[in-house]
Amino acid sequence: MKVFVNCLTLSRIIGTLILPLLFNFCSPIVTLVVIALLLSTDFFDGQLARKFKVQSLFGQVADQVADKVFGMVMLLIVASYYNLFYFIFGLEVAIALVNFIAALRGATTISSFLGKFKTWLTSICILVGVFGYFQDKLHFSLLTKALDTYIQNEEMILVVCISITIGCQITVLIDYIRHITKELSIKKPKITYNFKDKDKLKRVLFDTGYYNRYKGEPLSKLFLDHGYKIDKEGIENAKN
């Protein structure tokens, strides 16, 4: 089951990479169905991992990467329709880089409420952009009124959505930098990575017991031995 759950997560990354082709060469219905399927994997991989108790560090990292890749690709696609989306894309890259560098240096990078709110705003903005992208290709009667309203106010709707999202992104970026800088100035952790012990790395990445015991640690520390003894019987404290 652990292999299946991880494959489900990885399928979201692979499927996301073919989305630009679907937008250009397939019907809106096919494209929207594939998007819905990809989003469903984000729900089911987590649910299955918790239900069958097969969570792992690899699954956590893969899920985060899949979410970022999906968001970035979708932003680039809608940016080809409306260029202001490039600002959202650029800020998402900046936020991702700040979190990545912070994780490498040993800071906590758990998303705050503001960060989650930003993600929801970005998702809504992408949805509006997709709606605009396909406005000339959607002809369902149930959508006619909504499409007419959107077309008549497209510029205003997009500008408002993008402006709110950008403002929230800037706030989140500043908040993350402030929090991470403060944390690192207090802890000043020294992180040294050593992946030569392949057996130990494999257990760190895929062992559910290890993940459940130390998942509250900063991501960088989860990749380290850092005083913990990992043996065939399980995981136990060695030095700390």
Image: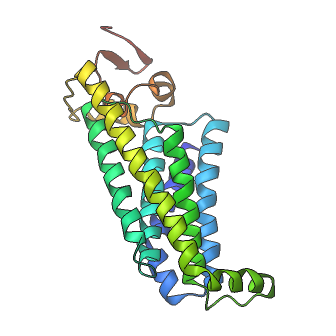
Nearest the camera: 177 or 134?
177
135 displayed left or right of 101: right
Nearest the camera: 94 or 50?
94
Against 86, residue 155 (above or below) is: below
Nearest the camera: 102 or 18?
102
**Residue 240 image-quadrant placement:** top left
Position of the N terminus, as image quadrant, is: top right
11 displayed left or right of 171: right
Against 220, residue 239 (above or below) is: above
- The percent position of residue 12, horizontal first and vertical second, equals 51, 61
- The percent position of residue 161, horizontal first and vertical second, equals 54, 65
Nearest the camera: 97 or 195?
97
Against 44, residue 206 (above or below) is: above
| Res. 10 in view | no
90 displayed left or right of 120: left
Q: Residue furthest top?
A: 239
